[in-house]
C-alpha cells in the first residue's frame, strides 16, 4: 500500500480539437486586421495633410452696368477676396503672377491682375469687344428680363512649393448677383459667399 501511494496519479489530458486551433488563429487575424486598419487611417491622415491647400473666399461682389444699349454693353465687377493667412509663404509665393478671371457660361470675359495679398480688392471691366454676340445677348437678357446674373471665376496664383508647376489654379463657386429693385445698373451678391478651391 505504501508503494502504491508513492506512484503519482496521471492527470487526464483532453485531446486537442479543431476549436483549440481556431481560437488562437482567430485572435491573430483580429490583431492583424486592427493593425492594418490603424495603419490605413494614419496613412490617409498623412496623405490628406500633404494634399491640404487652404480655400479662398469671396465675401462680396458688386456688379455695375456702366453702359447698356441694344448693341453695346460695358460692365464692371468689384470683388473682395479673403486670402487665409496660412496660404502666402507656405503655398503661395509672395511675388509673381496673380490673376483673376470672370467666367460667364464657361467663357472668360474679363481678366484682372492682382498686386496685393491677404484682403484683395479686384476691379474688372468688360465691354462688347471682350464678348461674342451670343454671350453679349445672354448677359443683356439676364440684366433686363431676369434681374439677376450668375458668374464663375478663376484664380491663378504663383506656387512656391517644391516640385510643383509654379502655378496654383483655383476654381470658384458660381456667384449669383441680384439687381436692386427697379434698377438695371447695380447688382450685389445674393446667397452664400463663393468659395474658391484649389484644382489638383
Image (spheres, grey):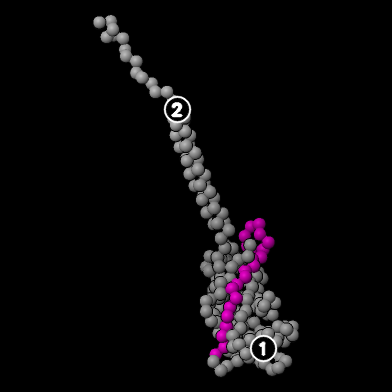
- Residue 38 picture location, percent across and down: 49, 47
Helix, strand or loop at disc 1? helix
| Residue at x-position 63% and y-position 65% | 199
The residue labelled by disc 2 is: 17
| Residue at x-position 64% and y-position 67% | 169
Residue 76 colored in magenta in the image: no
- Judged left or right of residue 35, residue 158 is right
Give the mark toward the camera: 1 or 2: 2
Mark 1 or mark 2: whose residue is earlier in sequence: 2
Q: Residues within 10 Å of mark 1 (few under 14, many from 20)?
A: many
Q: Over which residues does the magenta segment extend? A: 157-180
Do we see residue 111 in this rendering? no
Do we see residue 15 in this rendering? yes
Q: Quadrant of the C terminus?
A: bottom right
How many numbered circles are shown?
A: 2
| Residue at x-position 52% and y-position 79% | 191
Between 126 and 157, the residue placed more toward the observer is: 126
The residue labelled by disc 1 is: 140
- Residue 159 picture location, percent across and down: 63, 64
Disc assigned to residue 19: none
Q: Quadrant of the N terminus?
A: top left
Between 113 and 124, the residue placed more toward the observer is: 124
Between 56 and 34, the residue placed more toward the observer is: 34
Identify whether 71 is placed above or below 54. below
Q: Main secondary structure of the magenta part?
A: strand
Q: Residues within 10 Å of mark 2 (few under 14, many from 20)?
A: few
Helix, strand or loop at disc 2? loop
How far apart are the alpha carbons under marks 1 and 2?
85 Å
- Residue 193 picture location, percent across and down: 53, 76
- Judged left or right of residue 50, residue 1 is left
| Residue at x-position 66% and y-position 92% | 67
Amino acid at each position: 500500500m505504501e508503494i502504491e501511494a508513492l506512484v503519482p496519479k496521471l492527470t487526464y489530458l483532453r485531446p486537442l480539437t479543431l476549436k483549440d486551433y481556431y481560437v488562437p488563429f482567430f485572435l491573430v487575424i483580429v490583431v492583424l486586421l486592427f493593425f492594418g486598419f490603424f495603419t490605413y487611417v494614419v496613412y490617409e491622415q498623412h496623405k490628406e495633410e500633404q494634399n491640404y491647400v487652404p480655400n479662398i473666399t469671396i465675401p462680396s461682389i458688386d456688379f455695375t452696368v456702366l453702359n447698356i444699349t441694344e448693341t453695346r454693353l460695358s460692365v464692371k465687377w468689384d470683388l473682395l477676396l479673403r486670402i487665409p493667412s496660412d496660404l502666402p509663404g507656405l503655398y503661395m509665393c509672395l511675388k509673381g503672377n496673380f490673376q483673376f478671371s470672370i467666367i460667364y457660361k464657361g467663357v472668360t470675359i474679363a481678366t484682372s491682375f492682382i498686386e496685393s495679398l491677404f484682403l484683395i480688392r479686384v476691379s474688372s471691366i468688360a465691354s462688347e469687344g471682350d464678348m461674342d454676340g451670343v454671350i453679349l445677348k445672354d448677359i443683356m437678357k439676364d440684366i433686363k428680363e431676369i434681374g439677376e446674373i450668375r458668374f464663375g471665376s478663376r484664380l491663378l496664383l504663383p506656387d512656391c512649393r517644391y516640385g510643383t508647376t509654379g502655378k496654383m489654379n483655383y476654381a470658384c463657386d458660381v456667384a449669383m448677383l441680384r439687381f436692386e429693385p427697379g434698377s438695371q445698373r447695380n447688382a450685389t451678391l445674393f446667397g452664400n459667399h463663393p468659395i474658391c478651391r484649389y484644382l489638383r
